[in-house]
Image: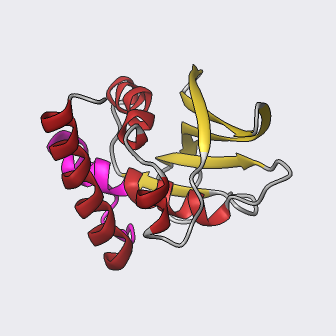
Amino acid sequence: MLNVGEQCIRFTELDTNRIERFLASFPGSFQGWRESEWGKFGLAPISFTYRSIPGGVRLIYFAGREPDGSLDIIVEAQRTIFGPPSSAVVLRPKRGLKRRERHEKVIFTRLQIGFMANRGLASELASRQAGPSRTIAKTISRIDSACAYDKWVTKRY
């Protein structure tokens, strides 16, 4: 059962080790995001660090130099009303002073896109799992392309 503010991506089958490796590298997909990238969603840039935790990764948000909330992205078993238990990647926010729900929606969509792009993981997504928002997914795809180009040309990242 999900709590308020939590989001999840369900899987029919899950290789926990593969998913955890994917999650450990996931925060790097935002490495090149600055004011212009977040601004495409009408958002101010977000500052965070990350660290591995059992079952996933924790994004630690900052307001200035002080930690201000976090987002755990973890693998866990999910109970279902009908059928066998399944596994899911759950995004579990711990609220700080600043509100970051809209940022977390973008992070969630980026995570969905990452799972769908990884052939070995995409076949394991639950069939009734809602896909990412087309609008957000299209914008993220353009940002990823621009960041990849920028990385290749400027060697900045």
15 above or below 97?
A: above
Q: Residue at x 75, y 63 (%)?
A: 4
The quadrant in which the C terminus is found is top left
Residue 131 in which image quadrant:
bottom left
Figure colour scheme? secondary structure
Q: Which residues are magenta?
A: 112-132
Residue closest to the eye, 111 or 106: 106
Q: Residue furthest right?
A: 97
Q: Residue at x 30, y 48 (%)?
A: 114
124 above or below 135?
A: above
Image position, residue 134 (x, y; %):
31, 77
Q: Residue at x 31, y 69 (%)?
A: 139
Residue 125 in which image quadrant:
bottom left
Q: Is residue 61 magenta?
A: no
Image position, residue 54 (x, y; %):
59, 21
Residue closest to the eye, 53 or 79: 53
Q: Is residue 143 left or right of residue 85?
A: left
Residue 2 in which image quadrant:
bottom right
Image position, residue 16 (x, y; %):
40, 29
Residue 102 appears in the picture as rendered: yes
44 above or below 57?
A: below
Residue 123 appears in the picture as rendered: no
Q: Residue at x 82, y 48 (%)?
A: 96
Image position, residue 10 (x, y; %):
44, 54
Q: Residue furthest front?
A: 154
